[in-house]
Image (cartoon, rainbow, N blue to C red):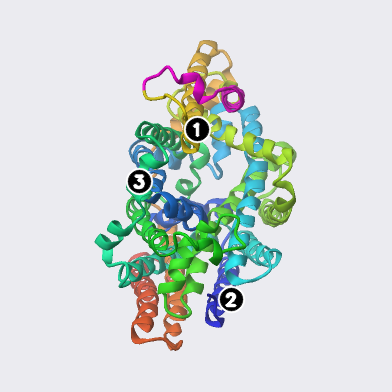
Amino acid sequence: MITGYDLISVAFYVLFILGVGLSYARRSKDTSDYFRAGGMMPWWVTGASAWMAGFSAWSFTGAAGKMFTTGPYSILLFYSILIPLVVLLLFTCHRFRRMQVITPFEAVRLRFGPGSQLFFTWARLPFMLIFGGVTLNAVGVFMAAVLGAETPLVILVLGTSVTMLAMLGGAFGVVASDFVQMFLVVTVTVLVTVLALNQPDIGGLSGMIEKAPSAHTNWSEFVRPQFVILWFVALMITKLFEENSIDKSAKFLMVRSDRDARLTLVIPLIGMVLAPLIWLVPPTVAAIRHGGDIGEVFSTLKFPEEGAFVLTASEVLPTGMLGLLLCGIFAATMTSMDAGLNQGAGIFVRNFYLPFLRPDCSEKRLLIVSKIATGVFGGIMVGCAFLWETMRDMQLFDLLTQVAISLGLPMSIPLFLGLFCRKTPKWAGWSTVLVGLAGSFLVRFWLKPEMFEWIPGMEGPFLPEEVTTFRIFASVILVGSGCVAWFFASRLFYDDEDLEYVARVDEFFGRLETPVELNSVARRKEGSLLAGSIGKLCLIYGAFVSLLVLIPNPVAGRLCFLVCGGVMLVVGGLIRVIHRKGSKETPGAESD
């Protein structure tokens, strides 16, 4: 399946990522640059980064396995985020930019006070690192199985690459690499889909639909329609709170203005509509061709169906392009991991080290501490990835997993409602989280679907998928409604005589009412320079991919490399041209 040409692509990708980190190493002059790119990023850069952060390698492994088994059913998982993104566009994203903070939890300090800042810092940070390691382990195991390499070596190489990019490049390196990697993911996956549909035994889109397994169109084989609706509604409500929560504001803190904050969502909205339809095709083709023997192909994977996307790709892509796909799969996860490291270091440095340990720390020293923290957290993440194999069967890890899942929705609710509801006590945020955590464990260990058989349409016996769906829906509705009720009930205890707290909250909402416009020549100049450097990165990667046309392949196979590399070259060239034009129009701006 893997050739030496594929390994060249993987090796270049690793070197490219390290090079991006080095190229942006000196751009960060303070922690504002390091954690939010100085708040000067153009929308098309943060939009690409936000979209890439919205999915991971799971989209090509776990989700592909689900599509292999159930077809379009899994697309609902991706589409559940569309309405929350519209809400984010209309009501929330500009508020994020107007908060005028460096890291999201500094806004928590303004809104709820230092006690809540400390609570949310340590409620989020440990699980961010632990499950970053779990994600790294999952990607490492999958890529090791495909590459035929040792899992520890793959984890070490990938983890080191992520850490070096985040540590050296900071937010500049993270979002710049995301933009280039977006085109790698899009072009290669589109090629896989087009080539798969053109296979003679598939017969195009209509042929694929006709030949797909019955479960792909008849979902009642594994779940009743009413449970599908409950599942979708639960996912949508969860995403509504999560995507509009203060702790998800990092990408919007990077942009130049309110307008850029709104435009940032253009790419995620388009991507989340079109990408799942594209990603559905390769697993469906694998289900048609290998419905009964995929376990023989991926015998080392615990769930062989998770290799469905790569299996189809290996059968239709020209020699040497599978390596590009593997880079794209890792890129999808790397986006969330390197951003997680950058944000994790920001949470620690700006929300614990600075306010509680060294309030008088200079910006120069703080920047050094930030880079050290990023490197240390990267090491912890890699360590967690190695430990995962021994921890997965331990009750301790099950407990950690349950706590992390149970914290998600309760943490998001007060950090969303707090943007709109002013008169709540300072303890409203953290107390809502504790109420939600208790409710989550109650639902998880006490509530059973059999308890609701008296409701029409909820009669037993229940299929396995229905039990899972019920638990998700029950958790979201009961925990969510309990948290919302508690948060609003806390208004009864609002103390307007706490002058320090009232003044802080007034400052927070005063910021939310003050538009942020791009009116600084210095910001325009720096933005132009950043755009030029990103265009150069696209040209470099596009040139490498185009050179792969030299690999011995039929004419059609060589054209695939030209298309993939050509897209990057054209995009990079356009950015450079526009950058030079902007440089001439902006006083003092020069091409890099």
Evaluate if marks 1 and 2 touch, with contact meaning CB atoms under 8 Å apart: no
Task: Please name the predominant secondary structure of the magenta segment in the image.
Answer: helix
Asked whether 445 or 305 is in front, the reply is 305
Quick one: 289 or 161, which is closer to the camera? 289
* CA gap, disc 1 and disc 2: 44 Å
Residue highlighted by disc 3: 262
Quarter residue 376 falls in: bottom right
Q: Disc 2 marks which amino acid?
A: Ala
How far apart in space, not on screen, are marks 3 and 2 (Cα)? 37 Å
Q: Which residues are magenta?
A: 432-456
Q: The residue tagged with tag 1: helix, strand or loop? A: helix
Q: Decide whether residue 436 is among the magenta residues.
A: yes
Q: Residue at x 69, y 64 (%)?
A: 156
Q: Amino acid at mark 3?
A: Arg
Please name the amino acid that badge 1 sits on.
Val
In percent of the image, x 63 and y 35: which residue is there? 402
Residue 300 pos. (x, y %):
62, 62
Q: State the residue at coordinates (62%, 39%).
A: 124
The residue labelled by disc 2 is: 11
